Image (spheres, grey):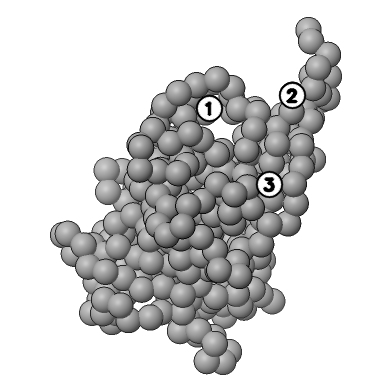
Amino acid sequence: MSDVAKRLKVIDSHTAGEPTRVVVEGLPEFTGTPGEWRDFLRAQHDDLRTAVACEPRGHEAMVGAYLLEPTQSDCVAGVVFFNNVGYLHGCLHGTIGLTVTLAHLGRLTEGENKIETPTGIVTVRPPEDGWVTVQNVRSWRHAAAVPVDVPGWGTVQGDVAWGGNWFFLIEAGDTIEVDFKNLDQLTDFTCAVRDALEANGITGAEDGEIDHIEVFGPTADDSADSKNFVLCPGREYDRSPCGTGTSAKLACLHAAGILQPDQPWRQAGILDSVFEGSVQEAFEGGVIPTVKGRAFVTGENELLVHPNDPFGEGIVYSRA
Ligand code: PYC
């Protein structure tokens, strides 16, 4: 067996507090669309994902992004997002992180830059003082006020919506205060909701697994229109207001007649960092959301994965 360590060049950033680690060099040879790359990496190189995202090189909140050559001539890059438990359909805080990373590498052009993702093409502009606006894929409310019995919590109602991932969106009401001091309770609550959705066969379109749970409450001041807690696949929460979650929220607000095209919406996350959003109408009642957030590059690194390292593939475990 070779004694040579595998090397992966990464650039780290955070968007509104949520990390993104872009792998810019070190992927195996392959050619394909982001969806084909995702399937190839999942089937044959999942150890790369766990090496990059899991401890000891990563941590539970880490979101990774494989930077790819685009297959479409009008795109500047392709990308596949992942975390410590698997692959994400889409990721907007990650797209904002990828955009500051591409700017850092001098790989953006002036004006609009298109990025190919497994869910479709998203469009960004070069950052201005770290602020990036992303035009997302079509988003829509799939089902409104869906009741689900959640053991220990009673019947909970939520909307099912697509914003680049499948979300169950719940108004917190009196159930729980959306505040950082309640992090453990919010995590337990949203994990219980996700388990209950699965147990009751509640899904998005085409049996899409609802793997993100979003709870909303008011902000303590007027700094935003709403504050959320978002459970991501696994047991970690999004440190940012979650861009695909904000898109799902905007789609639900529009479907409910609360948000008109171009009307601004300020969505705070659990750390009180804010994404600004708005929508344009799209076909079949859907919307094209635009989400703006701020990211900073935090590091350039080369990860080494030594063949004899017992944790070369990361520490992979699951919590009940
Ligand atoms: O910003 O879309 C997002 C996101 C998804 C998972 C973590 N962040």
Is 300 left or right of 46, judged from the image as shown?
right
Q: Amino acid at mark 2?
A: Lys
Instruction: Give the residue number, with chain letter if any, for mark 2.
Output: 6
Q: Nearer the viewer, residue 142 or 318?
A: 142
Answer with the quarter of the image where residue 170 lies: bottom left
Q: Residue at x 50, y 21 (%)?
A: 30
Please, is residue 137 above or below residue 217 in the view? above
Q: Earlier in the sequence, mark 1 or mark 3?
A: 3
Q: Secondary structure at mark 3?
A: strand
Q: How far separated are the C-alphas under marks 2 and 3?
A: 17 Å
Q: Nearer the viewer, residue 207 or 174?
A: 207
Instruction: Give the residue number, with chain letter if any, for mark 3.
Output: 11
Q: Position of residue 34 (x, y in %)?
A: 43, 35
Q: Secondary structure at mark 1?
A: helix
Instruction: Give the residue number, with chain letter if any, for mark 1.
Output: 41
Q: Residue at x 69, y 50 (%)?
A: 12
Q: Amino acid at mark 1?
A: Leu
Q: Position of residue 270 (x, y in %)?
A: 60, 72
